[in-house]
């Protein structure tokens, strides 16, 4: 009887630990800047949340870049001194909005 109680208690604790793992839609990506154009993701991104930080953690002003949210591309302006790397924080759309649906299987 005592072994069963410990088994149930152990399974309950394990299930609580697994239940706490939530994948957030907010993404963070550190990118080495070599050109004036950076591809952020392969699907469109949400314009509700978008920030760029330099290597020291300072937020880069929006007058130094342009973002095409539908193509998920970041374009730096010509007068902006290119950093060695930038940290891009953005909000990704849910998968069901960016997924390609078709009537027939293409394979």
Image: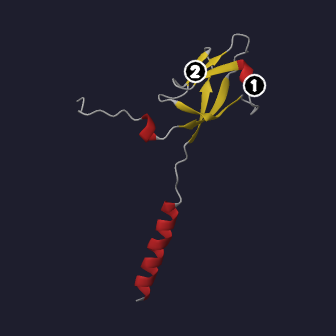
| Count of marks, rendered view | 2
Quadrant of the image for the C terminus?
A: top left
Drawn side of residue 51 relative to residue 95, left or right: right
Q: In this view, which residue lies farthest toward the top?
A: 78
Q: Quadrant of residue 106?
A: top left
Q: In this view, which residue lies farthest toward the front?
A: 103
For disc 2, the marked residue is 38
24 above or below 34? below
Question: Residue 41: x, y in percent?
Answer: 51, 29
Dot 1: within a 10 Å radius of its alpha carbon, few (fewer than 14), some, or many (20 or more) residues?
few
Q: Nearer the viewer, residue 94 or 21?
A: 94
Label disc, if present, on residue 61 of the rendered structure: 1
Residue drawn at the location 66% of the way across and 25% of the way down: 85
Q: Nearer the viewer, residue 85 or 63?
A: 63
Residue drawn at the location 72% of the way across and 19% of the way down: 64
Residue drawn at the location 46% of the way across and 66% of the way down: 15
7 above or below 27? below
Label disc, if present, on residue 80 of the rendered structure: none
Label 1 to label 2: alpha-carbon separation: 17 Å
Question: Residue 66: x, y in percent?
Answer: 65, 20
Q: Are marks 1 and 2 in contact (CB under 8 Å)?
A: no
């Amino acid at each position: 009887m005592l072994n069963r109680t410990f088994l149930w208690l152990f399974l309950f604790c394990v299930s609580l630990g697994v239940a706490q793992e939530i994948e957030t839609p907010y993404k963070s990506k550190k990118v080495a800047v070599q050109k004036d154009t950076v591809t952020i993701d392969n699907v469109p991104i949400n314009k509700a949340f978008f920030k760029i930080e330099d290597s020291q953690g300072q937020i880069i002003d929006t007058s130094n870049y342009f973002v095409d949210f539908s193509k998920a591309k970041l374009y730096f302006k010509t007068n902006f001194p290119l950093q060695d790397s930038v940290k891009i924080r953005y909000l990704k759309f849910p998968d069901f909005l960016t997924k390609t649906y078709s009537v027939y299987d293409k394979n």
